[in-house]
Amino acid sequence: MSEQVLHLDFIKLTPETSREQRSQLEAAAQGLRAIDGVTGVGVIEGEAGSDFDLAFWFVLQAFTSLEPFGTDPRYAKFLQASVAPLLQAFAGADVKLDDEFEADDGVAACLALIGPEEAYDFEVREALEAWSGPTQAACTAIGLAVGERQVYRGAAIGFGVQGPIETPEIEPFRATLIAGQARTLA
């Protein structure tokens, strides 16, 4: 059982965002590895059919690292100075991972589920596991939402996925999907 928390930032960029601006955004995210409690940083660049253009992941040592990360001036600067000028839409999630996080560069996909409050945690986990199985991912991280007021009830991220990945229909949940090339940044 892991103590790690995965913080996800889903970003839809303005259409005029340049490749250079994307690179600067990734460099700014990479710099957040210096925050105490952050053990890894990476990004998935969404391809056609993805709900967002980018998904940044930040691996935190434990739940106790979440508040210091979220209130750190460097993270605030990342959001305000780097993300906001390029932003069309934004969503985030914080999930406690079932197992230790392992990332690979290459094809990856991240699925986050919005669900009714009355859905049980085991139903969220089962839905995420059902999605991750057919992806044939080399490594997958699954977690349920932590903290209060989370839009997403849980998320799964798979590395080394096979075949086309499409947003699934998983009743009673609504899914957010980003699939494309992943890179570990720090």
Image: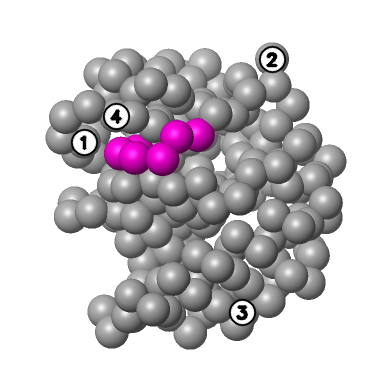
Could you tell me residue 50's position as x and y percent? 26, 52
Task: Please state if 30 lies on the left or on the right of 42 as rendered.
Answer: right
From the image, state whether disc 1 or disc 4 is nearer to you: 4
Q: Residue 6 or 101: which is nearer the viewer?
A: 101
- Whether residues under marks 4 and 2 lie with C-beta atoms below 8 angstroms apart, the answer is no
Location of residue 38 with respect to 139 vertically, above or below: below
**In 3D space, how far apart are the residues under numbered discs 3 and 1 (Cα atoms)?**
32 Å
Q: Residue 159 or 175: which is nearer the viewer?
A: 159
107 falls in the magenta region: yes
**In 3D space, how far apart are the residues under numbered discs 2 and 3 (Cα atoms)?**
35 Å
Amino acid beneath label 3: Gln
From the image, state whether disc 4 or disc 2 is nearer to you: 4
The answer to whether any part of residue 3 appears in the image is yes
SS under mark 2? loop
Q: Which residue is mark 2?
A: 1
SS under mark 3? helix
Q: Which residue is mark 3?
A: 80
Among numbered discs 2 and 1, the one appearing first in the sequence: 2
Quadrant position of the N terminus in the picture: top right
Q: Residue 72's quadrant in the figure? A: bottom right
Write the start and end of the magenta stretch as one range: 103-109
Among numbered discs 2 and 3, the one appearing first in the sequence: 2
Q: Which residue is mark 1?
A: 165
Amino acid beneath label 1: Ile
**In 3D space, how far apart are the residues under numbered discs 3 and 4 (Cα atoms)?**
33 Å
SS under mark 4? loop
Task: Please state if 56 lies on the left or on the right of 54 as rendered.
Answer: right
131 falls in the magenta region: no
Q: Residue at x 44, y 71 (%)?
A: 23
Task: Please state if 86 lies on the left or on the right of 101 as rendered.
Answer: left
